Amino acid sequence: MKQTSSSLATPQDTSVLRSTLLKLTATQKILCTVVVAVVVIVWYDLLNRMVAFGDKIDYSGLQVLGGEGIAFLQRYNPFFWWALVALCTLIIAYLLFGFVQSSRQRVQAKIVGAETFQSLVAQLSEPARDVLRWAWQDRSQPVTVGVLQRTAEELRSGRAGKILLSRLQAQLLDQPAAATASPYHAAEASAVREQAPQRPSPAQQAQSPT
Protein backbone atom coordinates (compact mmCIF):
# COMPACT_ATOMS: atom_id res chain seq x y z
CA MET A 1 0.00 0.00 0.00
CA LYS A 2 1.47 3.31 -1.03
CA GLN A 3 1.23 6.06 1.55
CA THR A 4 -0.17 9.31 0.24
CA SER A 5 0.91 12.74 1.40
CA SER A 6 -2.37 13.11 3.33
CA SER A 7 -1.45 10.01 5.34
CA LEU A 8 1.79 11.51 6.64
CA ALA A 9 2.63 14.44 8.88
CA THR A 10 3.61 17.69 7.20
CA PRO A 11 6.49 20.08 7.91
CA GLN A 12 3.90 22.50 9.24
CA ASP A 13 3.13 20.05 12.07
CA THR A 14 6.76 20.04 13.16
CA SER A 15 6.93 23.82 12.90
CA VAL A 16 3.79 24.31 15.00
CA LEU A 17 5.02 21.94 17.68
CA ARG A 18 8.45 23.59 17.75
CA SER A 19 6.88 27.03 18.13
CA THR A 20 4.58 25.87 20.94
CA LEU A 21 7.42 24.15 22.80
CA LEU A 22 9.61 27.22 22.47
CA LYS A 23 6.96 29.33 24.16
CA LEU A 24 6.49 26.79 26.95
CA THR A 25 10.21 26.24 27.64
CA ALA A 26 11.63 29.70 26.90
CA THR A 27 11.77 30.74 30.57
CA GLN A 28 13.58 27.56 31.61
CA LYS A 29 16.12 27.82 28.80
CA ILE A 30 16.85 31.48 29.52
CA LEU A 31 17.21 30.80 33.26
CA CYS A 32 19.61 27.88 32.70
CA THR A 33 21.68 29.87 30.20
CA VAL A 34 21.99 32.85 32.55
CA VAL A 35 22.88 30.69 35.58
CA VAL A 36 25.50 28.71 33.66
CA ALA A 37 27.01 31.84 32.14
CA VAL A 38 27.22 33.64 35.50
CA VAL A 39 28.77 30.63 37.24
CA VAL A 40 31.35 30.20 34.46
CA ILE A 41 32.35 33.87 34.57
CA VAL A 42 32.61 33.94 38.36
CA TRP A 43 34.55 30.68 38.51
CA TYR A 44 36.96 31.82 35.79
CA ASP A 45 37.80 34.90 37.84
CA LEU A 46 38.15 32.85 41.02
CA LEU A 47 40.43 30.23 39.50
CA ASN A 48 42.76 32.92 38.17
CA ARG A 49 42.95 34.43 41.63
CA MET A 50 43.51 30.98 43.15
CA VAL A 51 46.39 30.20 40.79
CA ALA A 52 47.92 33.65 41.36
CA PHE A 53 47.66 33.15 45.11
CA GLY A 54 49.39 29.78 44.84
CA ASP A 55 52.24 31.26 42.84
CA LYS A 56 52.93 33.82 45.58
CA ILE A 57 53.20 31.30 48.42
CA ASP A 58 56.70 31.11 49.88
CA TYR A 59 57.60 27.91 51.69
CA SER A 60 61.00 29.11 52.88
CA GLY A 61 59.60 29.66 56.35
CA LEU A 62 58.98 25.94 56.81
CA GLN A 63 62.49 25.18 58.03
CA VAL A 64 61.24 22.10 59.85
CA LEU A 65 60.84 20.36 56.48
CA GLY A 66 64.47 20.85 55.60
CA GLY A 67 65.97 22.10 52.38
CA GLU A 68 64.85 19.13 50.29
CA GLY A 69 61.29 19.34 51.55
CA ILE A 70 61.07 23.04 50.81
CA ALA A 71 62.54 22.51 47.33
CA PHE A 72 59.98 19.75 46.71
CA LEU A 73 57.09 22.04 47.68
CA GLN A 74 58.38 24.88 45.53
CA ARG A 75 58.83 22.57 42.55
CA TYR A 76 55.39 20.95 42.65
CA ASN A 77 53.45 23.92 44.02
CA PRO A 78 51.94 24.95 40.61
CA PHE A 79 50.79 21.39 39.93
CA PHE A 80 49.02 21.24 43.28
CA TRP A 81 47.03 24.40 42.64
CA TRP A 82 46.12 23.43 39.09
CA ALA A 83 44.97 20.04 40.38
CA LEU A 84 42.83 21.84 42.94
CA VAL A 85 41.39 24.04 40.19
CA ALA A 86 40.59 20.96 38.05
CA LEU A 87 38.87 19.24 40.97
CA CYS A 88 36.77 22.30 41.77
CA THR A 89 35.88 22.68 38.08
CA LEU A 90 34.61 19.09 37.93
CA ILE A 91 32.50 19.62 41.05
CA ILE A 92 31.01 22.85 39.67
CA ALA A 93 30.33 21.20 36.29
CA TYR A 94 28.58 18.32 38.05
CA LEU A 95 26.42 20.71 40.06
CA LEU A 96 25.54 22.73 36.96
CA PHE A 97 24.63 19.56 35.08
CA GLY A 98 22.37 18.51 37.95
CA PHE A 99 20.75 21.94 38.01
CA VAL A 100 20.05 21.88 34.26
CA GLN A 101 18.67 18.33 34.40
CA SER A 102 16.45 19.15 37.36
CA SER A 103 15.17 22.26 35.62
CA ARG A 104 14.49 20.26 32.48
CA GLN A 105 12.54 17.62 34.39
CA ARG A 106 10.43 20.30 36.06
CA VAL A 107 9.52 21.90 32.76
CA GLN A 108 8.74 18.48 31.23
CA ALA A 109 6.24 17.88 34.01
CA LYS A 110 4.60 21.26 33.39
CA ILE A 111 0.94 20.91 32.40
CA VAL A 112 -0.10 22.45 29.10
CA GLY A 113 -3.01 24.85 29.46
CA ALA A 114 -6.33 24.19 27.73
CA GLU A 115 -6.10 27.28 25.51
CA THR A 116 -2.56 26.48 24.40
CA PHE A 117 -3.50 22.86 23.70
CA GLN A 118 -6.60 23.85 21.77
CA SER A 119 -4.61 26.27 19.61
CA LEU A 120 -1.99 23.60 18.94
CA VAL A 121 -4.42 20.80 18.04
CA ALA A 122 -6.35 23.08 15.70
CA GLN A 123 -3.21 23.50 13.56
CA LEU A 124 -2.14 19.84 13.47
CA SER A 125 -2.98 17.42 10.69
CA GLU A 126 -4.72 14.14 11.46
CA PRO A 127 -1.50 12.05 11.22
CA ALA A 128 0.18 14.45 13.66
CA ARG A 129 -2.79 14.09 15.99
CA ASP A 130 -2.36 10.32 15.83
CA VAL A 131 1.25 10.73 16.95
CA LEU A 132 0.11 13.00 19.78
CA ARG A 133 -2.43 10.36 20.86
CA TRP A 134 0.34 7.75 20.78
CA ALA A 135 2.66 9.92 22.91
CA TRP A 136 -0.11 10.74 25.39
CA GLN A 137 -0.21 7.25 26.86
CA ASP A 138 -1.66 8.04 30.29
CA ARG A 139 -5.00 9.66 29.53
CA SER A 140 -5.77 9.95 33.24
CA GLN A 141 -3.19 12.77 33.43
CA PRO A 142 -3.24 16.08 31.53
CA VAL A 143 -0.92 16.68 28.59
CA THR A 144 2.48 17.95 29.71
CA VAL A 145 5.40 19.60 27.97
CA GLY A 146 7.15 16.23 28.03
CA VAL A 147 4.32 14.70 25.99
CA LEU A 148 4.64 17.45 23.37
CA GLN A 149 8.42 16.98 23.27
CA ARG A 150 7.93 13.24 22.72
CA THR A 151 5.43 14.01 19.96
CA ALA A 152 7.89 16.30 18.20
CA GLU A 153 10.65 13.68 18.40
CA GLU A 154 8.40 10.92 17.07
CA LEU A 155 7.17 13.11 14.22
CA ARG A 156 10.77 13.62 13.10
CA SER A 157 11.43 9.87 13.30
CA GLY A 158 8.44 8.95 11.10
CA ARG A 159 6.03 7.71 13.75
CA ALA A 160 3.00 8.76 11.65
CA GLY A 161 3.96 6.32 8.91
CA LYS A 162 4.56 3.55 11.46
CA ILE A 163 1.11 4.08 12.97
CA LEU A 164 -0.47 3.89 9.51
CA LEU A 165 1.46 0.70 8.72
CA SER A 166 0.45 -0.90 12.02
CA ARG A 167 -3.21 -0.20 11.28
CA LEU A 168 -2.88 -1.79 7.85
CA GLN A 169 -1.18 -4.84 9.32
CA ALA A 170 -3.90 -5.15 11.97
CA GLN A 171 -6.56 -5.07 9.24
CA LEU A 172 -4.73 -7.74 7.25
CA LEU A 173 -4.41 -9.90 10.35
CA ASP A 174 -8.15 -9.70 11.04
CA GLN A 175 -9.05 -10.84 7.52
CA PRO A 176 -9.58 -14.54 6.67
CA ALA A 177 -6.45 -16.45 5.76
CA ALA A 178 -7.52 -16.99 2.12
CA ALA A 179 -8.08 -13.27 1.63
CA THR A 180 -4.66 -12.34 2.95
CA ALA A 181 -2.68 -14.89 0.92
CA SER A 182 -0.20 -12.89 -1.10
CA PRO A 183 1.00 -13.62 -4.64
CA TYR A 184 4.40 -14.26 -3.12
CA HIS A 185 3.15 -17.38 -1.36
CA ALA A 186 1.57 -18.69 -4.57
CA ALA A 187 4.78 -18.09 -6.52
CA GLU A 188 6.78 -19.78 -3.77
CA ALA A 189 4.57 -22.88 -3.90
CA SER A 190 4.88 -23.01 -7.68
CA ALA A 191 8.66 -22.80 -7.48
CA VAL A 192 8.74 -25.66 -4.99
CA ARG A 193 6.69 -27.85 -7.32
CA GLU A 194 8.99 -27.06 -10.23
CA GLN A 195 12.10 -27.90 -8.24
CA ALA A 196 10.73 -31.24 -6.94
CA PRO A 197 11.88 -34.32 -8.94
CA GLN A 198 9.15 -35.59 -11.26
CA ARG A 199 8.53 -39.36 -11.26
CA PRO A 200 7.77 -40.96 -14.66
CA SER A 201 4.32 -42.30 -15.28
CA PRO A 202 3.70 -46.10 -15.55
CA ALA A 203 3.36 -45.78 -19.35
CA GLN A 204 6.72 -44.04 -19.61
CA GLN A 205 8.30 -46.75 -17.44
CA ALA A 206 6.92 -49.51 -19.70
CA GLN A 207 8.32 -47.81 -22.82
CA SER A 208 11.76 -47.18 -21.36
CA PRO A 209 14.45 -49.86 -22.15
CA THR A 210 15.37 -52.16 -19.29
Image: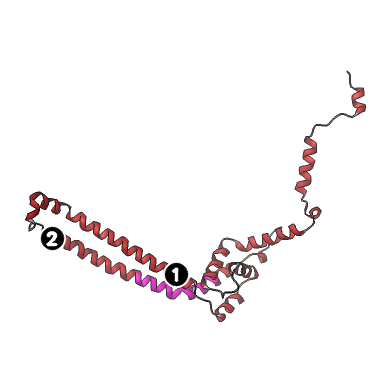
Circle 1: residue type: Arg
Numbered circle sitting on residue 33? none
Picture quadrant of residue 148: bottom right
Using residue 87 as the reference point, say whether residue 196 is left or right of it: right
Q: Where is residue 65? Give x, y as percent.
A: 10, 53
Q: Is residue 151 toward the left or the right of residue 45 in the image?
A: right
Q: Is 206 drawn above or below residue 62 in the view shown?
A: above
User: Disc 2 on helix, strand or loop?
Assistant: loop
Magenta stretch secondary structure, dominant? helix
Outermost bottom residue: 115
Q: Is residue 19 visible?
A: no
Q: Quadrant of residue 152?
A: bottom right
Q: Is residue 85 above or below residue 35?
A: above
Q: Is residue 202 left or right of residue 177?
A: right
In the image, the segment drawn in magenta is 17-35
Q: How would you rate the neighbour count of disc 2 (Cα within 10 Å): few for under 14, some for 14-19, many for 20 or more?
A: few
The residue pinned by badge 2 equals 57
63 to 45, vertically: above or below: above
> Residue, x 59% and y 79% (percent of image)?
118
Q: CA distance from mark 2 to mark 1?
A: 43 Å
Instruction: Report x, y in % for residue 206.
Output: 92, 23
Magenta highlight on residue 163: no
Depth check: 197 or 95 in front? 95
| Mark 1, residue position | 104
Front position in the image: 198 or 92: 92
Q: Is residue 6 visible?
A: yes
